[in-house]
Image (cartoon, rainbow, N blue to C red):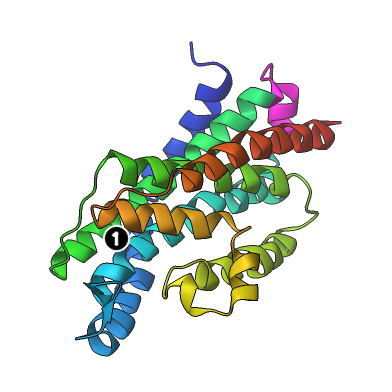
Amino acid sequence: MIRGWSAIYFREMLILRRRFFKLISAWSVSPLLYLIAFGYAMGKGVVVQGHTYLEFLIPGLVAMTSMTQSFAIGSEINIARFYWHIFEEFQAAPISNTAYVFGEVLAGMTRALLAGCVILVLGALFGVVLSYNPLFWLAFLLNSLVFAALAVGLAMLIKSHADQAMMTSFVITPMAFLGGTFFPVEHLPEWAQKILWFLPLTHASDAIRASAFGVMPEAGNYLILAGLAPLFIVFAVISVNKARN
């Protein structure tokens, strides 16, 4: 019998399966445009950190996707809450709040993993060959875990689906462009670098890019992501407790 977190995860995977090919198409559009506009047209012949701009861009897009797609689980939760009233059924079901959080977080991480693989396939079609080693995937999964947990927690606090879009605009979009995705953070003023150091995506981008280049990433990047993950999970559980009360 399916119980607890696996029931939540199974439900999200059923929805994902029904929309799989539409999602694959949606996950391909933005990275493809970035690769053509920034990587191929503008970045042809441009060298960044000893690599072509396309090679620099692919890990950044992977890091950004692990953030945006894992955080997107918050939108799915709020659609279920505000339009389908599925959360009310969870409230009545014998499912613990912790199990609910883990099921939704795992679903967000799965979405991010699939979307990340789409980018790697697109990169291969553009002739980009990098090292996708265990450290690469560890940074990817830790980043996905952090933002999926954050998404679940925030989804329980907002009062409408419009607020979810606003949250994305103020939280996710700035990180997507300033977290070392499209350019080295070192090119910014020192005061800006100090601010960006507090963003999880900055550390994820650095770790993912370094491992993709075959360089040993800084252990601090992994420690920071690993430290934020349980904090955001606790935040998510507390938020679900308040929502159910």
Which residue is at the far top? 1
Q: Examine the residues drawn in magenta and state their main secondary structure.
A: helix
Residue 126 in view: yes
Horizontal and vertical percent for residue 1?
Answer: 48, 10
Q: Residue at x 87, y 31 (%)?
A: 245
Q: Residue at x 57, y 48 (%)?
A: 147
In the picture of the structure, the residue carrying the numbered disc 1 is 119
**In the rendered structure, does residue 229 fall within the stretch colored magenta?**
no
| Up/down of 154 relative to 5, above or below | below
Horizontal and vertical percent for residue 207?
Answer: 40, 52
Q: Residue at x 30, y 51 (%)?
A: 211
Identity of the amino acid at label 1?
Ile
Q: Which image quadrant for residue 166? A: bottom right
Q: Which image quadrant for residue 41? A: bottom left
Classify mark 1: helix, strand or loop: helix
Horizontal and vertical percent for residue 53?
Answer: 27, 76
Q: Magenta residues, as a range?
A: 86-97
| Up/down of 123 relative to 152, above or below | below
Q: Nearer the viewer, residue 94 or 131?
A: 131
| Up/down of 82 relative to 22, above or below | above
112 left or right, relative to 158 = left
